Amino acid sequence: MHKLPTIDFTNKRNLKPGSTSWLATSIESTRALEQYGCFIAEFDKVTPELNGAVFKGLQDLFDLPTETKMQNKSAKPLYGYVGQIPFIPLYESMGFDYSNTPDGVKSFVDVMWPNGNEAFSATVLSYTRLVAELEEMVTRMVFETYGAEKYLEAHRNMVTYLCRGMKYRAPKTNETNMGFVPHTDKDFITVLHQNGVNGLEVKARDGQWFTVDLKPSSYIVMSGDGAMAWSNERLYSPFHRVTMNGDENRYSIAQFSFLEGIIETPKEFIDEEHPLRYKPFDHLKYLEFYSREENRRLESALKAYCGV
Ligand SMILES: O=C(O)CCC(=O)C(=O)O
Ligand SMILES: [Fe+2]
């Protein structure tokens, strides 16, 4: 049976670039993203108080009337409110856009309903800033492990985030327990977190599905299609899904990193044995491609979009 590795990113490890612990963690993280496409990160920058406020806020948000939630609209694909999806009745989600201001962070209140959710907006912003630190560390570690540091600065300058809050209600008797359909993430690196209720399942390279048992203080770091294409398939973008067992509602929050620009495989990943697998592509246009109904059932949207 498969089990995801747990990697320690807590403050006590004192991870400083170049230190012994940093190097060890870099190799561990990169190998896990190659083998499983994800790992469990122990990370304690988000305090229990902030964590509690995030999930209390999400609960209150999803408790609002549908008409109110529908006012959170965005022209960007996959941002804004996604209401009930017919074939996955347990699922509901809201994407928060906070990417385009001078300091790189925009309050999603701007794109939200008028009556103000300022307190929750501030909570989500503090949360996302801290989680971005984890994403930054892992990205840097991966680039360094592959000897691709020289591409890191350009990469960082292009990163933009989509943060999505999710509610999966507990299934009623005789109702499907499918929380979310199998898919790969379309981004570069995802950081996922949940309210203590398990449900995430990941498909290993050998085709076996396995469950992820997550402590309330832990996170899942996952490589998406963007990272898989960039690394010429060294990093793996795993299929994953949500299955709801038990009678508790599940809330989760995912932070997706996208590049505002072109993803191109560095030449360091290409040789005779590893010919180029994906043409350079515009990451946000790929997201747009995927968000169209006719492209959502593709076995590999990435191969269809930019496969060589
Ligand atoms: O809720 C989860 O744990 C998974 C969500 C997910 O896979 C996604 O939003 O892409
Ligand atoms: Fe996902």
Image (cartoon, grey):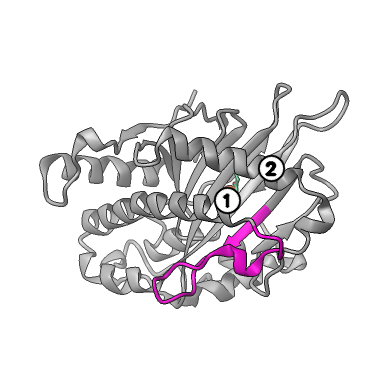
Residue 252, quarter of the rendered image? top right
In the displayed image of the protein, which residue is found farthest to the right? Answer: 174
Of the numbered discs in the image, which one, if any, rests on residue 82?
none
Q: Nearer the viewer, residue 124 or 85?
A: 124
The three-letter amino acid code for the residue at tag 1 is Phe
Establish whether ligand 1 lies closer than 8 Å to the Cβ of label 2.
no
Measuring 49% from the left and 23% from the top, which residue is drawn there? 1
Tell me where the magenta segment starts and ends, as one range: 94-116
- SS category of the residue bearing label 1: helix
Give above or below for 163 relative to 175.
below
Give above or below for 92 relative to 225.
above
Please tell me whether residue 101 belongs to the stretch shown in magenta: yes
Establish whether ligand 1 lies closer than 8 Å to the Cβ of label 1.
no
Q: Which residue is mark 1?
A: 120
Check whether the beta carbons of the residues at disc 1 and disc 2 lie within 8 A of each other.
yes
Q: Which residue is mark 2?
A: 60
Residue 90, quarter of the rendered image? top right
Specify whether residue 181 is in view.
no
Measuring 16% from the left and 39% from the top, which residue is drawn there? 21
